[in-house]
């Protein structure tokens, strides 16, 4: 996401010259190019101008520290202003009532139904809630069935009223049902249209009046650019929603909606959604998004995702096995599974500072581990447990069984052996030796 904007901003910062202070002369060309970059990213032109004017006001006359160059100082000011433009800080969803009611609104095709499932999964897994999904879209073919399929995937029940075409009545019945069966969050998926129309607005307004939701979330497809911002304004004028959800952010190279929408409707972006998997939903952090836009990565989010998959007891067992040099292919397979649970591989790599630029043109498939897993699954239980058994004939059999070549098998086994040696060195006393080796390495 934001690939084009990131590249343009990087080029803009290289334009600034001089040392000592930021001046009218050395900042003018840079900010002119920054404004063009924002406009190309589909940011509202008034917001782009206000943004660069504010950056200029704050930057002019600032002393440049000895350790910094003017371009680096401009990057910091732009970073801070980007974060402020997108809201400044993360804002949580309001779940103060019991049960709490969340109304999900937006145009058809924006990803409302998928988001409803993702939100239920997020609240269940990360906030220990007991959610109920409500199928309020009675018009779109298969909308109810889609929600049922998603609910089954994540283990969350879906409330429906067979044959009913009255979403207001369905919403009321769902609230009664939730209270009776002790559900603590009700997520109502509403109908959308291809464009804003009076009938849709009247209906969603009536649902709001009927159930008095604690939280109204407006879901918008970020790939629609400025149209997304205009639609958000129309919905907010009628619904006065509490927050925005940006979907399909992984497919958008412009990102203007994310940068403009907060300023236009004065409502926070609360979630961003990428991909179709039910765990591909993140709380929106403006400062972290500013980091990513400026090519600085997002290490905090990467660590948080890793912690979600981190099992303390399993980690202890693994540490003991590594110390005894007993780490095997079963353990390796488990680690691959945990990495895959963290999300899209290219998205994860983009969170590492500097890595996003390096891999922008590299096609990293979600099935990047497929051949590795196939090779390991083609081993016998004894071979996975005892890699020393893997002689030439066994490797040939594994290659045939996994649909790979013997070179692929040899390469994996060598990488595994190298990794195991390094892990052994780092654990226990070897870690001290490694530290000493690194300290004594020649410096350039």
Image: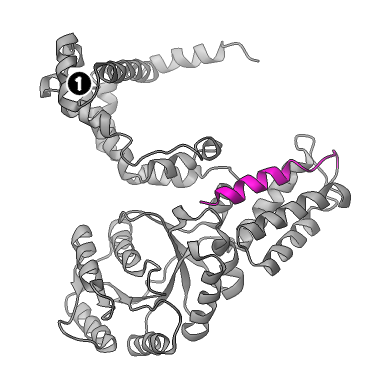
Residue 160: name its quadrant: bottom left
Residue on which disc 1 sits: 399
| Residue stretch rendered in magenta on the structure | 1-20
Seen in the picture, residue 166 relative to 287 is either above or below; the reply is below
Seen in the picture, residue 379 relative to 232 is either above or below; the reply is above
- Picture residue at 24% right of the left edge, 62% below the top: 150
Seen in the picture, residue 26 relative to 187 is either above or below; the reply is above
- Picture residue at 52% right of the left edge, 68% below the top: 268
Most distant residue in the left direction: 381
Viewer-proximal residue among 360 and 291? 360
Q: Quadrant of the C terminus?
A: top right
Q: Where is residue 202 drawn, in percent x and y?
A: 40, 90
Residue 72: name its quadrant: top right
Q: Where is residue 272 drawn, in percent x and y?
A: 44, 59
Viewer-proximal residue among 208 and 167? 167
Q: Where is residue 305 drawn, in percent x and y?
A: 38, 46
Seen in the picture, residue 263 relative to 372 is either above or below; the reply is below
Q: Secondary structure at mark 1?
A: helix
Viewer-proximal residue among 171 and 112? 112
Is residue 7 found inside the magenta-colored segment of the image?
A: yes
Q: Is residue 99 visible?
A: yes
- Picture residue at 34% right of the left edge, 46% below the top: 308
Q: Going by the image, does 282 lie left or right of 5?
A: left
Q: Going by the image, does 62 lie left or right of 200?
A: right
């Amino acid at each position: 996401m934001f690939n084009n904007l990131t590249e343009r901003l990087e080029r803009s910062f290289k334009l600034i010259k001089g040392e000592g202070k930021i001046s009218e002369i050395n900042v003018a060309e840079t900010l002119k190019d920054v404004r063009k970059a924002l406009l190309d990213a589909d940011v509202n032109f008034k917001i782009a101008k206000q943004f660069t004017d504010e950056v200029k006001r704050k930057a002019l006359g600032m002393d440049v520290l000895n350790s910094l160059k003017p371009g680096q100082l401009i990057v910091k000011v732009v970073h801070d202003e980007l974060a402020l433009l997108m809201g400044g800080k993360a804002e949580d969803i309001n779940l103060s009532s019991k049960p709490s009611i969340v109304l999900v609104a937006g145009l058809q095709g924006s990803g409302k139904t998928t988001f409803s499932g993702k939100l239920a999964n997020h609240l269940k897994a990360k906030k220990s809630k007991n959610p109920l999904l409500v199928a309020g879209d009675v018009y779109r073919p298969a909308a109810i069935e889609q929600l049922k399929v998603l609910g089954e995937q994540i283990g969350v029940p879906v409330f429906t009223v067979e044959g009913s075409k009255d979403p207001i009545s369905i919403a009321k019945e769902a609230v009664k049902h939730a209270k009776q069966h002790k559900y603590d969050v009700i997520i109502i998926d509403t109908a959308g249209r291809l464009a804003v129309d009076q009938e849709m607005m009247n209906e969603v307004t009536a649902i709001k009046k009927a159930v008095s939701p604690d939280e109204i979330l407006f879901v918008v497809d970020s790939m629609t650019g400025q149209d997304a911002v205009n639609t958000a304004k129309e919905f907010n004028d009628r619904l006065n929603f509490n927050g925005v959800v940006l979907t399909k952010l992984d497919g958008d190279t412009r990102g203007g909606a994310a940068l403009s929408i907060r300023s236009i409707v004065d409502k926070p972006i609360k979630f961003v959604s990428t991909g179709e998997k039910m765990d591909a939903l993140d709380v929106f952090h403006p400062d972290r998004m500013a980091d990513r836009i400026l090519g600085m990565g997002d290490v905090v989010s990467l660590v948080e995702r890793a912690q979600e998959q981190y099992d303390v007891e399993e980690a202890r067992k693994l540490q003991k096995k590594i110390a005894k040099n007993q780490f095997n292919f079963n353990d390796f397979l488990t680690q691959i599974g945990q990495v895959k649970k963290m999300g899209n591989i290219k998205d994860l790599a983009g969170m590492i500072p500097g890595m996003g630029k390096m891999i922008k043109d590299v096609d990293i498939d979600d099935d990047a581990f497929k051949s590795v897993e196939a090779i390991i699954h083609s081993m016998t239980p004894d071979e996975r447990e005892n890699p020393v058994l893997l002689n030439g004939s066994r490797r040939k059999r594994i290659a045939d069984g996994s649909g790979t070549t013997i070179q692929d098998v040899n390469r994996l086994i060598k990488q595994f052996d190298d990794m195991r040696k390094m892990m052994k060195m780092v654990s226990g006393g070897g870690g001290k030796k490694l530290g000493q080796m690194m300290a004594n390495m020649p410096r350039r």
